[in-house]
Amino acid sequence: MSETSSATIVAEMPDARDLGLHFVFTTYGVAVRIESNDDRVLAKAKAIAKKAFLDRLEFIIDDNRSVDIIFGIAVIEGGAFQLRENRENISETPSEAILMNFFRSYLRVSVAERSKDWIFVHAGVVGYNGRAIVIPGNSFSGKTTLVAELVKFGAEYMSDEYAIFDSDGMVYPFQRDLSIRVNGDRRNAVETKLEALGGRAAMSALPVGLVICTEYVPGESWAPVRLSLGNGIKEMIPHTISIRLNTSLALKALNTGLSRAIILKGARPESGPVAKEILSLADSDSNWS
Amino acid sequence: MNNPQFPIARKSGLVVQEVPDEVLVYDLDTNKAHCLNKTAAAVWRSCDGKNSVSDIAKNIQAELGSTVSDDLVWLAIDQLSENALLENELQSQFAGQSRREVLKKIGFASIVAVPVIASLVAPNNALAATSCACVNPGACLTQTTCPSTVNCNGSGICAP
């Protein structure tokens, strides 16, 4: 069966107010409405939304409820797919798989940007002896690899994507399966269960003990420099999703959250030896717990 | 050399976070984050349009308890101006001199930390930082932190 054979095309309605079918949910304080003109596509979008936020969705029945953002996935003539944001077309592709992959990422970022109570920082996070180790970084910087190594050496898994701060600077778990790349190639990323690494999950929010601003550079030696609090927050800002829309809260949460943390910056070599050194540093820090 | 100018700290379009011994400033217009060290922050706070550079030097001397030269204040003013953290444009005291030359001159004469403003730009595209997802090559143009800004690969990632 082709990807679109079961599609029920209502109409190509670039200016229509609604694609006909929809559901509404809230997550992390953000209300989202998702629309489609195809019930199969809508069901898929629902599954993606649930997975994107680890089932932390509250579905809303009230159709008149105002929302923060509206997404639409339209099946258009010719079987292509359109992604709409607030009823404006933002992307179009003949591949349903690519559109859904894009939608999952876009949905996560959109909620992270609009959350008023939570600050999402793109980072890997583990817990260790009651405090969090936060590793901010862009995609392809090697966060997940380092997180996986830390977990193998006894740290508790919190996230390989987001450090989620509350306004008091505590970091909350966001434990999706780890997306581990084979030979650094994104196309070969494998969703890996925590259990497969022999790891444990952190169960509660933790204060930050250590921030590691790093990226993998082959052949580099591990010689990070310690940053001041202000410079540490500055390094976190490019990875803070809501920095433009919720600047005050983001700066406050980072200031509070990092106020008792050691903040290090430096390129790193292979993750195994570095993970050991990071945990040794935590072990030797008298302020750790 | 006396250069009686009266700098004014910019207030609008900025979010300011006080950090022990530093000030963090986020510029909403340029999406730049600036970290001002203690000396740069002290100078910036004194830029009220009423204080001359010499007045600011005296204020900071009183605040930090160490001798502060006009040159040191000018070094901060130059950086504040460069980062659009002042309302008014001032004629630099150091025209024709490199910052290295100025630092050398000040460095030996001052025990107060040299003013430093470290800056970073937040990315335009939050998606780039988190996933590099795309549906076509055009979507990669602004994803400048991804492995490719020209290619959307078969997996829908801005990468070769």
Image (cartoon, coloured by chain):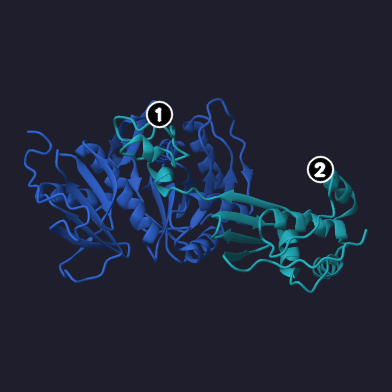
Answer with left or right where residue B2 lies relative to residue A187: right
Give the amino acid type for the residue marked by disc 2 in the picture.
Arg
Between A228 and A61, the one lying in front of the other is A61
Q: Is residue A108 above or below residue A80?
A: below
> What is the letter of the cyan chain?
B
Task: Please tell me if label 1 and label 2 are on a single chain.
Answer: no
Answer with left or right where residue A51 lies relative to residue B152: left
Between A65 and A129, the one lying in front of the other is A65
Residue wearing tag 2: B100
Give the amino acid type for the residue marked by disc 1 in the picture.
Gly
SS state under label 1: loop
Quarter of the view holding residue A178? top left
Residue B32: give x, y in percent of width and height: 57, 54
Between B95 and A139, the one lying in front of the other is B95
SS state under label 2: helix
Q: Residues within 10 Å of mark 1 (few under 14, many from 20)?
A: few
Quarter of the view holding residue A191? top left
Alpha-carbon distance for marks 1 and 2? Answer: 41 Å
Residue wearing tag 1: A184
Residue A122: give x, y in percent of width and height: 43, 49
* Residue A155 in view: no
Farthest bottom residue?
B50
Answer with left or right where residue A8 lies relative to residue B64: left
On what subunit does the disc labeled 1 rest? A
Q: Residue at x 14, y 39 (%)?
A: A79
Q: Are marks 1 and 2 in contact (CB under 8 Å)?
A: no
Q: Residues within 10 Å of mark 2 (few under 14, many from 20)?
A: few
Quarter of the view holding residue A118? bottom left
Q: Colour of chain A?
A: blue
